[in-house]
Image: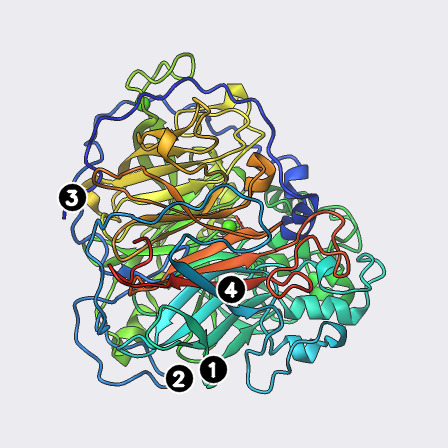
Amino acid sequence: MPEANGNGVRRRLLPLLNNRNGGRSAMTCEYRCGNQCAHPAPNESDNEYFGDMVSKAMSRRGLLRTGAVAAFVVGSGASATALAGAAPAARPAAAGGRPPGDGDLQVELPELGRPVNFMAVQDNTVDSVVVPNGYDWSVTIAWGEPVEQGAPEFDIDNQSVEAQLKQFGYNCDFVAVLPLDRTFDRALLWVNHEYTNENLMFRDWVDVASATEDQLKIAMAAHGGSVVEIERVGDTGEWKPAKRKRYNRRIHTWTEFEIVGPAAGSDFLKTGDDPSGTTALGTLNNCAGGTTPWGTILTAEENFHQYFGASADISDPTTRERFGRYGIRTSAGTSRGWDRVEDRFDLAKEPNEVNRQGWIVEIDPYDPKSTPRKLTGLGRFKHEGATISIAEDGRAVAYMGDDERFDYVYKFVSKNTYREGTDRRSRQHNMTLLEEGDLYVAKFTGNSPEFPDSPPNDGLFDGTGEWLPLIEDGESKVDGMSVEEVLVFTRLAADQVGPTKMDRPEDVEANPATGTVYVALTNNSRRTPAEVDEANPRAENRFGHVIAIDEAGNDAAAKTFTWQIVIVCGDPEDPETYYDGYDKSQVSMISCPDNVAFDPSGRLWIGTDGMPGSTGVHDGMFVMPVEGDDRGHLRRFVSTPIGAECCGPAITADGRTALVAVQHPGEVSGATVDNPASTFPYGDFARPSVVTIWRKSPSGGPYIGD
Ligand code: FEO
Ligand code: CA
Ligand code: CA
């Protein structure tokens, strides 16, 4: 393998002068995150924006990575599952079973550092999925299609709660594919259902106030996630739902979850329905996620605040402070109307119910009867996702972003170590790893003390960093806060230790081939010129950027790191932008980076959310080599339909299929079922859907990106 991240000559970055506002559809703002951008950023702490306080010399990026991650990536947003190098398993997993043996896929994998060869999809505004010449795509599953046994076919005019509980949920975000057999002809598809858009679901929808209880409950049933057994079509890269549904499962707002980890049973988590504080119903606003090397799904509860209303003002000052830091309402009112259906969504009646959302959830897709678990050890915030790496000493490390303007990047390091193998005992052990460990929050320090008064003296936005402890060795490292308080009110705890306020941390993922961790910072149009720092160097950042972190010693459990901005997004002709030093006349325009994935060849894939508002062209899926001569040559691989965000993305473990979640197609202000802004995917009205993309003519190689 060539030297990863080799230090080639980089183009000098020019001063950043951007002064434009961010933008996305007003309908998206209302439904996806409860208009959180319309409110002041909840982080009012006085943590610094200026990073250049320390210039401690640390080794620059560019070392060959070995052994940092004991796994290959299979899913999007964060998926690592063990696919190489361990004992074979002779038979497919049975329902209620476990994944095929570590790394025993009988498939040929592409070599590391493989060049990208397709011709980039151009900027466009087509109401469809557009893929490069030589590729094909199909809809794998769309909103309302049957998932569980006995589910009816979708009929938009005959929706019911009972049907939706068994059908594919609404907006699809994180996508993962986990193998069911050694030849990788059968697999499990996991998809998050982040939120609903009732305007585009019901012909007769007017507003929350006039919604029927059935409509509200159908929306509740359409949240959560789906497990769908899929199978390959012939010997192509295409996948379709299998007839067999042994693993198929809907997770929704009434699914029972176990609360585990140090905050389980805490007074902060007790409610009238659950005086033990250990059992919660439902998982809400599941955005990105990851898979673990032991074959489980991690799914992240993000903008959970919007589902809670209040029948009276919240007066207790401590509760008001805690709610305020999470953007949870403190005055009487509703946004989704769910508090009308169940008291648990009424903050005045059940102030602790909201503390039971905002977690990373672990789900075993190989056991449809398993109880999913909320992992309190990983802290509570607006979790974007979680990706697992294995540290030098075998501890499991989860990288996590808190997606809000001026919030932070976190990592969790397990107390116990990963046990290789997918035998039942190893798997049971590994499934406890994320229950106990240390929790850190990131501080980024620039190495150009004169910035922002003048451009960085080394022409790069880069520097050093520290993982500041919040919990270590089972003890709180935050003055005046107990372990339970740190974990349940993590944002308030982090405010006290001085992390760096970031431009909306979305996906944070390590590249299994190199160990380098990529942080997608999607945008932050509210950062003022006085608030820029070297890690967030652009005022009114509409386009976002991507930071690469190299852990000290390439050890995921390290407490220090170096970092460098590798993409400053936006129009390549804009002198403010930067594409890892590559000739910008050759790259595709990217903006608002959101989900990150890697293929078996170690190439970086990025899904975007917000290009229509920031650039006028549709969102998409992009690939960027991270080493060799083509490093930084970012190309658009997929463009998504009108109003849609490009989620997933996922590249399967064999490198032969890309999956994209077309989230909220047609989500344009004023659109309805009968007056759709998009008719993707079937030509009638807009339906969120998962799309599979594969090479049509595999001569010269069957791999995605060739
Ligand atoms: Fe649901 Fe942070 O995107
Ligand atoms: Ca610098
Ligand atoms: Ca996201």
Quick one: label 4 or label 1, which is nearer the N terminus? 1
Provide the secondary structure element on which disc 2 rests: loop
329 over 682 or under it: above or below: above
Q: Position of residue 620 (x, y in %)?
A: 48, 48
Instruction: Name the residue carrying label 3.
Output: 64
Instruction: Name the residue carrying label 2.
Output: 96
Q: Are marks 3 and 2 in contact (CB under 8 Å)?
A: no
Quick one: label 3 or label 4, which is nearer the N terminus? 3
Marks 2, 4: nearer the viewer: 4
- Report how far apart the C-alphas of labels 3 and 2 lie in the structure: 40 Å
- Report how far apart the C-alphas of labels 3 and 1 lie in the structure: 43 Å
324 over 681 or under it: above or below: above
Quick one: label 2 or label 1, which is nearer the N terminus? 2
- Residue 691 seen in the current view: yes
Instruction: Name the residue carrying label 4.
Output: 690
Marks 3, 2: nearer the viewer: 3
Q: Are marks 2 and 1 in contact (CB under 8 Å)?
A: yes
Amino acid, disc 3: Leu
- Report how far apart the C-alphas of labels 3 and 4 lie in the structure: 36 Å
Q: Residue at x 43, y 22 (%)?
A: 575
Residue neighbourhood size for the residue with mark 2, other residues' Cα within 10 Å, grouped as few (<14), some (14–19), many (≥20): some
Marks 3, 4: nearer the viewer: 4
137 over 245 or under it: above or below: above
Instruction: Name the residue carrying label 1.
Output: 369
Q: Position of residue 558 (x, y in %)?
A: 25, 44
